[in-house]
Amino acid sequence: MEKRNHLETGLFLLKCLSLAYILTAALLALLALLVYRFSLSEKLVELVIIVIYVGTTFFGGFLAGKRLQRRKFLWGLLVGSLYFLILAAISLIVNHSFQDVAAGFLSVLALCAAGGMLGGMFS
């Protein structure tokens, strides 16, 4: 019985992460359209990307906290941290180097983890 609960929890966390990444992809596509249409500055684009990361991890943490009910902030923190780890792994695979990933590694990790944790807390 308990193994089933762990499996269900793990699958639900994967669903939360999947929804967060789908939302990220949609928002980044919208941002790309806005950059193309309005020639936005690089600083503004970087800021919006950070807001997208924090917002989507907040969303994932919120969903996890709503469903799991106990230790909501920890589940949100886990969702935000996993989101970042997957993001860093994909970036590392695509770029074939750690240099681009390492530039804002700790700050983006902190922002993603905090976004997920806040989402869990507010659920």
Image (cartoon, rainbow, N blue to C red):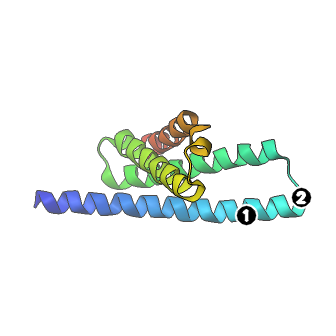
What amino acid type should be assigned to the residue bearing mark 2?
Answer: Phe
Give the percent coordinates (x, y) of residue 69.
Answer: 31, 48
Residue 94: % across, % down: 57, 59
Counting the numbered discs, the total is 2
Q: Position of residue 40 (x, y in %)?
A: 86, 52
User: Is 117 drawn above or below residue 63 in the view shown?
Assistant: above
Residue 73, given in percent of the width and then of the height, sits at 39, 39
Residue 30: which numbered mark, if any? 1
User: Going 41% across and 41% down the picture, which residue do you hit?
Assistant: 77
Q: Nearer the viewer, residue 1 or 43?
A: 43
Q: Which mark is residue 38?
A: 2
Question: Closer to the N terminus: mark 1 or mark 2?
Answer: 1
Residue at image x 56%, y 54%?
Answer: 96
Question: Please, what secondary structure does the residue beneath circle 2 have?
Answer: helix
- Give the farthest residue toward the front: 96
The residue type indicated by label 1 comes to Leu
Q: Which mark is residue 123?
A: none
Separation of disc 1 and disc 2 at Cα?
Answer: 12 Å
In the displayed structure image, the side of residue 85 where residue 91 appears, left or right: right
In the rendered view, does 38 fall on the left or right side of 75?
right
For the point 57% across and 44% down, the residue is 101
